[in-house]
Amino acid sequence: MQKIKIHENYEYWYFENQKEYFDTVEQMLNEEYQITDSIHLCIELTKEDKCYLLSFIPVDVVDENIKDTLRQLDKDYKIVYPNYDHCILNTISSIRKQFGGKAHYSLDEHMEDIFKEKRYKNVIVMLLDGLGENILENNLEPDSFLRKHHLYTNTAIYPSTTAASTTATISGLSPLRTGWLGWQNYFKEIKRNIVLFNGKDYFTDEPTGFNGYKALHYEPFYTDLKVNGSIHNPNFKKRKRKFKSVLKQSLRSIKKKKQNVQYVYFTEPDSLMHEFGTFADEVIAKLQDMDKDLSWYAKKLPKDTLLFISADHGHTNIKNIEFYNCTTLLKMLKRKPSNDSRCITFRVKDEYRAIFPKLFEKLFGYAYDIMPSSEAMHQEFFGKRNEIPHTRVYDFLADYVAVAKKEYCFNYKGEENFEFKSHHAGITADEMLVPAIVFRK
């Protein structure tokens, strides 16, 4: 820790170690210091005539203008809120209508115009994980297949994360309806945070034998339609997955004498962006290869086929906050945080219900907006206000929801958790704007 005297009775303390920072904050609050200011992710603590500015954010110059220096670190991010009248659920509703089914949401006006021009025998909905508008625009050339067929822009399902969005796409229903609200959630019957996709304990990585698909069952959106419906995913057991293999699987499943509706999914560029960042050379190379595969795939598709390509969410480069070391707030919780790193939920002990959101705001208000879960539902973060929530939603969302709006991301799992360079599940435009790419044959 570095202690720098700014002027009489005022010191700046910089901590290279976040644990030491959070421990010092807790100690000073216990000694009845009051938080009198919050700048970026730094807090000012005052008691009588003594004042300290605590920070784990490095700066080049520390002088009497330190507060202004810290404020200059603030970045402006465009915020995009979820809109269940302009998302993939509306696209799905239009597809359902096209094949004689009931539309569960308002119709996608762009798709309606397309369907007025021609009735397609085959419709394929494809999600490329993490391919937000910013990723598409910055990582591929204008003459690429994906950019040439870019038609319009949608907002992502919220949370802008794979478990919520892919499930919404397959089911045609919002996270509010399915209960698939994030990467992992707390199941009270076994008192564990379960990763929905694989049934493992999120904090220990131990298999639990619990099946998220059974607990939160849903049917594909085409189930009640008179079509040959199919789902095509990569082999998740393999680390190296081939996009072209999934595309070939899709082509083989199209039956010439039937109407076909497919859902096709691939894990990239998401996993590479987590590891290397949004605009890394590895990401660009992978997208270029995928774009070539799509050009090949489009030529192989039979006539009367509509291919709709989008993403479950976008991506943004992030910096990690060691929330697992923030015992000041963790001790106020009945159970560990859950849901997702940039859309995090808290179940708070009764005696801390009033103080928890206020203290959270002072510590992390720059990076996250916190609100009662009921307010988040009322603001239609997870689905339309008039929808009937899944029975587990109220327990999953707990008391408060914190939504990321800047470049910081909570690590609440622990020191051994892999630190992503890029992430999602927040409400920045980079995470929330996804392309609608349409190829017609």
Image (cartoon, grey):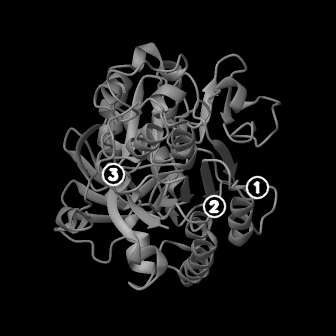
Query: Which of pointers 3 and 1 indicates the residue nearer the eye?
Result: 3
Say left or right for 357 vs 95.
left
In the image, residue 221 sits, relative to residue 438, either above or below, namely above
**Mark 2 secondary-structure assignment:** loop
Mark carried by residue 267: 2
Given the image, on which type of amino acid does mark 1 rest? Phe
Residue 264: percent from left, percent from top: 62, 55
Label 3 vs 2, first from the N-terminus: 3
Residue 320: percent from left, percent from top: 49, 58
Residue 194: percent from left, percent from top: 68, 33
Give how far apart the Cα atoms at labels 3 and 1 are: 38 Å
- Characterize the local packing of mark 2: few (<14), some (14-19) or many (20 or more) Cα atoms within 10 angstroms: some
Q: Which residue does the numbered mark 1 point to in the structure image?
A: 236
Label 1 vs 2, first from the N-terminus: 1
Can residue 98 be seen here? yes
In the image, residue 231 sits, relative to residue 334, either above or below, namely below
- Characterize the local packing of mark 3: few (<14), some (14-19) or many (20 or more) Cα atoms within 10 angstroms: few
Given the image, on which type of amino acid does mark 2 rest? Thr
Tell which of 149 and 12 is nearer to you. Answer: 149
> Residue at 41% across / 32% down in the picture?
103
Residue closest to the far top: 350
Give how far apart the Cα atoms at labels 3 and 2 are: 33 Å
> Residue at 56% across / 82% down in the picture?
288
Given the image, on which type of amino acid does mark 3 rest? Lys
Say left or right for 208 vs 188.
right
Residue 115: percent from left, percent from top: 38, 51
Quadrant in the picture for residue 379: top left
Q: Which residue does the numbered mark 3 point to in the structure image?
A: 116
Give how far apart the Cα atoms at labels 1 and 2 are: 9 Å
Circles 1 and 2 in contact, beta carbons < 8 Å: yes
